Image: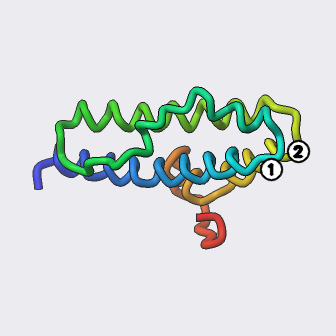
Amino acid sequence: MPPDIQYQDILLDDIKEYRKILSALLESLNTSPIQECKDIREDFDLSLLEEYPYAYSGTENVENDVKKHRNEIKRIMESLEKQDYEYSKEVYNECFNAYIYQYYYLGNHDCPFNGLNS
């Protein structure tokens, strides 16, 4: 398999995991008892959770999609971290400590797999 196709395959796998992170974060924000947490959703790019065409569409296109997903995760996590609510801190810590976030988003390939936080 050509290296650029292998690279795109890795990026597409990352996008799948980023979408899981975003879905979990949105679910937590949707069910928040605090309006300021819910307000974080206002700037959310809903197109990131639409049906995604997992196809080889060129390295640059897939890299741009990766950046969009990563930027949205970063924005949400930074917003949660800035808030001074216990709920915000819980959501932030739960996401930050999850295997999927550590491995795929932070690139911590030495993190232990914990099935409960994947």
- Residue 77 or residue 53, whichever sits in front: 53
Residue at image position (46%, 49%) is 19
**Residue under numbered circle 2:** 86
Residue 64 image label: none
- Residue 71 or residue 40, whichever sits in front: 40
Q: Residues within 10 Å of mark 2 (few under 14, many from 20)?
A: few
What kind of residue is marked 1? Answer: Glu
Query: In x, y percent, where is residue 21?
Result: 55, 50
Label 1: which secondary element: helix
What kind of residue is marked 2? Answer: Glu
Q: Along the horizontal axis of the image, is 44 left or right of 62? A: right
Query: In x, y percent, where is residue 95?
Result: 66, 51
Callout 2 touching callout 1 (CB < 8 Å): yes
Quadrant location of the C terminus in the rendered image: bottom right
Label 2: which secondary element: helix
**Residue under numbered circle 1:** 90
Render colour scheme? rainbow
Query: In x, y percent, where is residue 80?
Result: 74, 36
Q: Residues within 10 Å of mark 1 (few under 14, many from 20)?
A: some
Give the answer, above or below, for where 62 lies relative to 9.
above
Give the answer, above or below, for where 71 lies relative to 19.
above
Quadrant location of the N terminus in the rendered image: bottom left
Q: Alpha-carbon distance for marks 2 and 1? A: 6 Å
Residue at image position (43%, 32%) is 68
Q: Along the horizontal axis of the image, is 63 left or right of 103? A: left
Q: Along the horizontal axis of the image, is 1 left or right of 33? A: left
Q: Residue furthest bottom?
A: 115
Residue at image position (33%, 30%) is 64
Q: Number of numbered discs present?
A: 2
Q: Along the horizontal axis of the image, is 31 left or right of 47? A: right
Residue at image position (48%, 32%) is 45
Q: Residue furthest left?
A: 2
